[in-house]
Every structure is written in C-alpha cells, then in structure tokens.
C-alpha cells in the first residue's frame, strides 16, 4: 500500500524534528498539556477553608459552610450582642465542640493572629480531562475539566467530588517547549485565574 500524503508529511516532520533535536515539549499534545497543568503550583495548591471562631455575624453563622459544620456537630453557637462594627443582629459566639476539637485541631495548617480565622487544608484538585486545544503561533488556550477531591473529613463534608469544573488556561511556546502561563500576558489567561473562574459542569 502506497503511503498517503498525510503520512509522508508526518514522516517528513518527524525526520526534520530529529535533525533539529526537538523535544517532546515542542508539541502541545493533550498529554503534555495535562502533565504541565497537573504539575503547576497553582493547580497543586490545596484548598484552604478558613474557620472563624468567636463572635460572628448571623450571615456568617447561617452560611452553607457553617451549617455543614453545625450539622456534623463540630461547632456550636450561642446568641450574643453584636459588636458595634457588626450589623445586623443577632450575632453568635462560635466554639468548637469536643468532637470538633478532635476532628479539626489535627488539621490546622495556619491561623491568623489575635484569634483570627483558622486555616484548614481540606481538598486538592484532580484533573479529569483535556477537552480541547486552540493554537495560534506560540500561544494556545487549553480547556480542561477538573474536580475537588477531599483530603480529610472536613473536605468530605464541604466538597462534593461529583461536581466538575471547566477552566481555560493559556499556554506559551518558548525555545525549550511549551509552558503553562503562570502570570498575565497578552491574549492568555493564567492558571490561577482560570481556576478561580471555573464554572461547574455536569459530570
């Protein structure tokens, strides 16, 4: 069977690349895009949940996250008079229950001074698929789907792994291959912004 025109073109490109010393990073494939996104600092950064104890507004105390923690028996709140800077009433004095202390204290990664919010690492991102690549010269946009995966009991309570998110991130080609855009450059969206702007999508 005679080779097709497409086969000849591909073979010529491979031979030319071998002669020029190309690396796998010179070709922005879905596999490379997935590897670069997964390895980036922005994608690997864990999700922090900030738990505020002490006097909080009714708006905060009745937020979905606080309601989850209340239902799990990890926090309780007693009604209190609101400080002058907090409005409207009522306010609540939030405390960890004994069960909450046992569950949350080992997970505390950081806390703000003066009894401020407590930072808890609760989830990490998992890349599910690369959905499309659009290239224009040395610039490209990659659309991908990901989800939150809990890393402890608090994360499991707050995040549903069945909810998927879709993001689009910019890539740029350099002399040593393609890289994920980590900072804003013309025509590209950096990964941290793409993750912040992610839209939930059906799994």
Image (cartoon, rainbow, N blue to C red):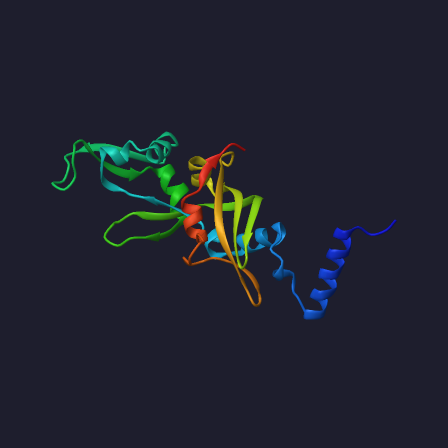
Residue displayed at 60% across by 55% down: 28
Rendering coords of residue 161 (x, y %): 50, 37
As drawn, the residue found furthest toward the bottom would be 20
Residue 25 picture quarter: bottom right
**Nearer to the camera, 42 or 184:** 184
Q: Is residue 26 left or right of residue 10?
A: left
Furthest-front residue in this view: 5
Along the viewing direction, whichever of 153 and 96 lies nearer the viewer? 153
Residue 185 located left or right of residue 142: left
Question: In the rendered view, does 7 fall on the left or right side of 131?
Answer: right
Q: How many marks?
A: 0
Above/below status of 176 relative to 149 = below
Q: Residue at (29%, 53%) from the top-left corner?
A: 112
Image quarter (top left, top right, bottom left or bottom right) of the C terminus: top right
Residue 128 percent coordinates (x, y):
57, 42
At x 77% / y 52%, what residue is drawn?
A: 5
In the rendered view, would you say 42 is above or below 69? Answer: below
Which one is nearer the viewer's eye here, 16 or 45? Answer: 16
Q: Position of residue 186 (x, y in %)?
A: 42, 57
Q: Residue placed at 68% from the left, 70% from the top?
A: 20
The answer to which quarter of the image holds residue 19 is: bottom right
Q: Residue furthest right?
A: 1
Residue 98 x/y as whole percent: 35, 38
Q: Residue furthest left?
A: 84
């Amino acid at each position: 069977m005679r080779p097709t025109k497409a086969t000849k073109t591909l073979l010529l490109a491979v031979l030319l690349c071998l002669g020029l010393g190309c690396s796998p990073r010179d070709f922005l494939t879905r596999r490379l895009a997935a590897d670069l996104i997964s390895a980036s600092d922005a994608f690997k950064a864990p999700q922090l949940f900030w738990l505020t104890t002490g006097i909080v507004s009714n708006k905060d105390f009745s937020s979905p996250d606080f309601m989850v923690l209340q239902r799990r028996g990890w926090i309780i709140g007693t009604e209190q008079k609101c400080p002058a800077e907090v409005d409207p009433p009522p306010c609540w004095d939030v405390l960890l229950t004994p069960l909450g202390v046992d569950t949350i204290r080992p997970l505390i990664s950081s806390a703000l001074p003066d009894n401020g919010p407590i930072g808890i690492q609760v989830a990490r991102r998992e890349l599910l698929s690369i959905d499309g690549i659009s290239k224009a010269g040395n610039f490209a946009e990659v659309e991908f789907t990901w989800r939150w995966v809990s890393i402890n009991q608090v994360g499991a309570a707050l995040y549903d792994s069945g909810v998927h998110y879709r993001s689009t991130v910019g890539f740029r080609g350099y002399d040593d291959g393609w890289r994920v855009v980590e900072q804003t450059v013309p025509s590209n969206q950096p990964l941290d912004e793409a993750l912040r702007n992610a839209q939930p999508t059906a799994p």
